[in-house]
Every structure is written in structure tokens, then in C-alpha cells.
Image: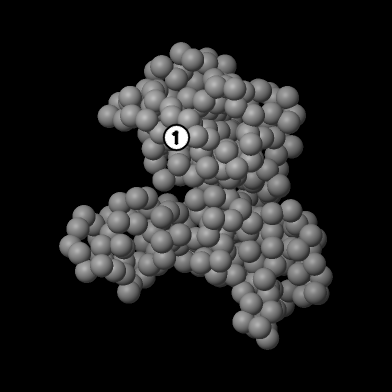
Amino acid sequence: MKVAVVGATGMVGEVMLKVLAERNFPISELLLVASERSVGKKMPYKGEEYSIVGLADAVAAKPHIAIFSAGGDTSLEWAPKFAEAGTTVVDNSSAWRMDPDKKLVVPEINANVLTSNDKIIANPNCSTIQLVMALAPLHNKYKMRRVIVSTYQSVSGTGVKAVRQLENEIAGVTGEMAYPYPIGRNALPHCDVFLENGYTKEEMKLAREPQKILDDRTFSVTATAVRIPTSGGHSESVNVEFHNDFDLNEVRQILNDTPGVTVQDNPDTNTYPMPIYAHDKDEVFVGRIRRDETNPNTLNMWIVADNLRKGAATNAVQIAEYLVEKGLV
């Protein structure tokens, strides 16, 4: 495969290269693509140095697959150009996720919707991916009615500038601010921009994307997204009301049997998912599984994942792997 990684110099781009190497993705030619100011710089991959190329040169090279993590505006402008050249784009931005003509894919759940005609494929939001990884198998069994999710999201979800802000605050250094307020010793109920309905874009992604991924509008999701002073890993407190009753041991078994999900749930030993444990791992971790005693057929659980890996880079690479495995590229 001739593969382009667009946005290779960014936080997610660097993790994408790491994941491609770890999983031995079949690359015959690698194009590392970034903005004009980075063209000509060198980046390592599997012990070799690669020169950064610009977007126009990458399109002209006609890669089989282009994995994008370069922001929505870049994706809107350049993904169609790659697609017109015959390249299949896997896009990590929000640009195409809710486009009715584009597939929104978490491979463990709905990779089977992909065909060779899908030239721009959307990677879901990081917090959506870990949420649906746990919800999908339970929905199949018990049928969801309503989901209430509160997120506790790391600064790496904002980008390198936010990570630097947190590090500066910990070190007592005055520096550039990614947020309107300090993030150290704080929690900001503000992920992405506010919309007219009072929700943030991040909260509306959590509300809309699960319905598209599961191809089901019979359940609803409402969200509150909060930024907290952790450097990596997103956590979610999730309350799910089902149409049908459930057995807690069966819930744990269903989740444990789900590829990509690991149950960590033993209050006796203080075993539960934490961002520090999820760091650099691809699994989605689920714990604090318990019945909501205030409402029938309702479950509480806690979901944690590395937002740069399964929440972004790994999911995109898994989509690319599926395309290759099924001969769709």
C-alpha cells in the first residue's frame, strides 16, 4: 500500500505513525504530509527518515489510502481532491461525520457498511468511539431508550497547546493559554465551542454520532463534556436506560466478550478504569458497573480510553486495515 498520513506532525499524526508501525501495516511507500511551513522537515518511521511533503504533491502521488488528522478545514478542502485522484481517505476531523453520504465507522461495530465506493470515510469523535464500544453490545441485547453521559476529557484532546498550558501551570510558568481559564486544579465545562442551544459542539457530537454509527434513532443521548487537568485519556460517567431488564453479571460478560473492551470492575480491590492505566493502550476499559436504583432497567458505568489511540489514531488505522483485508482499496 502507498499510504499518506496527512497532519503527520500533529499530536494525533505522530500517534498514527506509531500505531501503523506497531501493527505492521503493509506500507510499500509512505508519504508524510503537513502544511507548507513543515515541508522539507524530516520525521522518522521505522528507523528511516522521511521528508515532509505538501498536500498538492501528496495528491499527485495518488496514494491508495490517506489517513487525515489535519483539522476540519483542511479535510473539507483536500479530502475530495484525494478522492478524485482515486485515494480512499480516512478522516479524523469532524468535517464529514454527519454528512449523510459518508460512513461513520468504528470497525468493531459497523465496518461491514464499507464498500469500495466509499472514498471519504469519517472517524468518529474520540469520546463517541469509547462510548459506543461499550453501548453497542448492550444495545443489541437490551435495547437502549436513553443515555446520559458526562465526560472528563484530557487536555490532549485539545492539542499540544493545551498540554503545554497544563505543563506550564504545574511548573508555575506563565505561558500561552489554550483555554480561557487555568486548567490546572480546575475543571472546565467547556469542550469545543458553544452552540445556540447552549450545548457545545462536543456535546452534540456525543448526542448525534452514536445514532449514526448504530444506524438507530430510537434512543437518545444527552451529554455534558468537561475538560479536566489530565494530560491523556478520556473518562465518561454513563447512565443507560434500556427497554429490557438486565442481569449485572450478564452485562459484565457481554462487555468482556466484546473485542476491544476490557472490564475492570471489582470494588473489593479498588479495581476500576483510570486514564493513567489506559495510557498508550488500545482497549476501552469499563468499570463501576451497577444498577441505577432510582430508575427501572437503568445501568451506570464508567468508561475510559486513550483518546489519541482508540479515540483517534488506532480507530483510523483499523479502518484502513479493514479496507485492505477486504480488498476495498
Type of amino acid under label 1: Pro
Q: Which residue lies furthest to the left in this view?
A: 174
Residue placed at 53% from the left, 35% from the top? 46
Name the element at disc 1. Answer: strand
In the rendering, at what x and y percent does residue 162 appear?
Answer: 32, 56
In the rendering, at what x and y percent does residue 144 appear?
Answer: 70, 62
In this rendering, is residue 73 above or below 132? above
Q: Report the quarter where the C terminus lies.
A: top right
In the rendering, at what x and y percent does residue 177 appear?
Answer: 23, 57
Residue 149 in view? no
Residue occupied by mark 1 = 44
Tell me the quarter of the picture where residue 297 sits: bottom right
Residue placed at 36% from the left, 61% from the top? 190
Q: Residues within 10 Å of mark 1 (few under 14, many from 20)?
A: few
Q: Residue furthest front?
A: 47
Q: Report the quarter where the N terminus lies.
A: top right
Residue placed at 80% from the left, 67% from the top? 253
Residue placed at 38% from the left, 53% from the top? 158
Left or right relative to 140: residue 215: left
Tell me the quarter of the picture where residue 123 sits: top right
